[in-house]
């Protein structure tokens, strides 16, 4: 899970009409308030999208349904 600074940075990298602004931080707080086991949370601050996808795709603790080749 990204921290607030990373969320803000990533939001600013989006096209202006796709930015979420304060809502992005609100959603981060909502997610943090849920009692999700740490083992299901990926620290994404220092990962790019391809690395995150690779973790989700290859770690058995994340169920994504059937894989299509």
Image (tube, grey):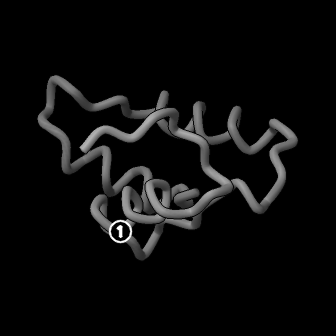
Residue 22 lies, in percent from the top left, at 47, 33
Rendered image quadrant of residue 57: bottom left
* Residue at the image point whose x is 39% and y is 51% from the top: 8
* Residue at the image point whose x is 68% and y is 55% from the top: 61
Residue 38 lies, in percent from the top left, at 79, 60
* Residue at the image point whose x is 48% and y is 28% from the top: 23
* Residue at the image point whose x is 46% and y is 69% from the top: 45
Q: Nearer the viewer, residue 49 or 33?
A: 49
Residue lying at the far top of the rendered structure = 17
Q: In this image, 35 relative to 61: left or right?
A: right
Q: Looking at the rendering, in which quadrant would you find the N terminus?
A: bottom right
Residue 47 lies, in percent from the top left, at 39, 71
Classed neighbour count for the residue bearing mark 1: other residues with Cα under 10 Å, few (<14), some (14–19), many (≥20): few
Local secondary structure at mark 1: helix
Rendered image quadrant of residue 60: bottom right
Q: Circle 1 is placed at which residue position? A: 51
Residue 2 lies, in percent from the top left, at 52, 59
Residue lying at the far bottom of the rendered structure = 46
Q: How many marks?
A: 1
Q: Nearer the viewer, residue 22 or 64?
A: 64
Q: Looking at the rendering, in which quadrant would you find the C terminus?
A: top left
């Amino acid at each position: 899970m990204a921290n607030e600074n990373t969320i803000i940075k990533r939001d600013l990298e989006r096209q202006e009409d796709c930015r979420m602004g304060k809502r992005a931080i609100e959603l981060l707080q909502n997610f943090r308030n849920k009692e999700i086991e740490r083992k299901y949370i990926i620290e994404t601050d220092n990962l790019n999208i391809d690395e995150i996808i690779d973790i989700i795709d290859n770690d058995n603790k994340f169920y994504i349904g059937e894989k299509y080749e």
